Amino acid sequence: MAAMLLHGADIFDGTRLGPGALLVEDGRIAAVLAADATVPGARRVALDGGVLAPGFVDLQLNGGGGVMLNDAPDVETLATMAEAHAGLGSLTILPTLITDTPELTAAAVAAVEEAVRLGVPGIAGLHLEGPHLSLARKGAHDPALIRPMGAGDLAFLLGAAKRLPRLLVTLAPESVTTAQIATLVKAGVIVSLGHSDAGFETCRAAASAGAAMATHLFNAMSQMGNREPGLVGAVLATGTLDAGLIADGIHVHPEVMRAALAAKTGPGGLFLVTDAMAPAGTAITAFTLNGREIRRADGRLTLADGTLAGADLDMARALRVLRDDVGLALDRALGMATEVPARVARLSDRSGALRPGRSADVVHLTPDLHLAGIWRQGTPVALSPA
């Protein structure tokens, strides 16, 4: 494959944003060069301003391309989801299974294992969101399928962790024991706290046992009050807890995001997730989840009673919300879609940064932060409908 020099846009390499040019050779990043660099023999690709950044990393997406993982947990569904999200700039993903039956959950684990074996592009592991959640904070999860974690459940997750390159599990700390959390963490599972009504001390105990993050901060969790800080307070006060954020301006108000970002300046940080469902990358206006219709309208996905059911969101739109509505510096916003989730999911050796030797998974954003180009291993990817 001939060398390609992408120039004419600023470069965000995962930590820094500034002028530059990106040299790609044989599907990998060969060098990040000065903006006016020339490379004899390289095909020059002129970009009309904007930013080149690493491909986005999304740790929570439930569907895309018109399909849901819950509906058909097989390799074909995973490939459809990955293709749809690649066209939205998310080149590394953790497909997410919403609370379901043990049989379907086992099928999802087997499907991701097979997809990884076959090399389906972009599939980095599996996120199991439930079933060990709080009924009081169930959101759109089916209450009939929610349950505390038993010995058999723990054994299943430990087995899944051995079969998958990475396994992220969202659970409510009141539905498990700290010993179970510690056992999962020792086995390599990334434990996330979510869909929880637990108090501050229970959440801090879960973090001490090894829980590493929280799922969609502020949504489906105990809020921060003047006498009981809840899970929100535990996340903001605990440096070891990272947290996903649905930055569509609907799930969390921009002023609330601004306050959380001021509180979480490291080492534990916030990162972007889409919580995308079947409509991602399509124009469909309705779909079903566990037999219930979910409607798409006005940038929202809702059950018939108005309950939010995932998000109608892509990473580029989330970046626009962070920059334009929240007022966040662009370099930090870009990091929340790339470097931070890659670190959280232990993907930093392959994703989240533009460094020599890495796979050339790159997105080009226009000055107003719309996608203008996507490359996977240096090969252009067709844009999906946003």
Image (cartoon, rainbow, N blue to C red):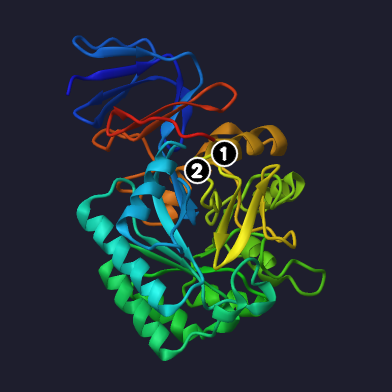
Residue hosting label 1: 333
The image shows residue 86 at horizontal and vertical percentages of 40, 40
> In which image quadrant can residue 268 be found?
bottom right
Farthest residue to the right: give it.
Answer: 226
The residue positioned farthest toward the bottom in the image shown: 151
Tag 1's secondary structure? helix
Image spot of residue 105 (x, y percent): 40, 72
Residue 36, numbered circle: none
Q: Is residue 382 left or right of residue 235?
A: left
CA distance for labels 2 and 1: 7 Å
Does residue 45 sit above or below 285 in this rendering? above
34 vs 120, nearest the viewer: 120
Q: Secondary structure at mark 2?
A: helix
Q: Residue at x 28, y 29 (%)?
A: 378
Viewer-proximal residue among 383 and 149: 383
Q: Is residue 50 visible?
A: yes
Say whether marks 2 and 1 touch (CB < 8 Å): yes
- Residue annotated with mark 2: 337
**Residue drawn 76% across the image and 74% down it:** 228
Measured along the vertical axis of the image, is residue 143 above or below residue 319? below
Quarter occupied by the N terminus = top left
Q: Kindly identify the amino acid type of the residue bearing the numbered disc 2.
A: Ala
Which quadrant would residue 45 be assigned to in this image? top left
Residue 36 vertical position relative to residue 102 in the rendered view, above or below:
above
Q: How many marks?
A: 2
Q: Residue at x 46, y 60 (%)?
A: 96
Question: Which residue occupies the foreground of this view, 23 or 295?
Answer: 295
Residue 177 in the image, given as x and y percentages of width and height: 51, 86
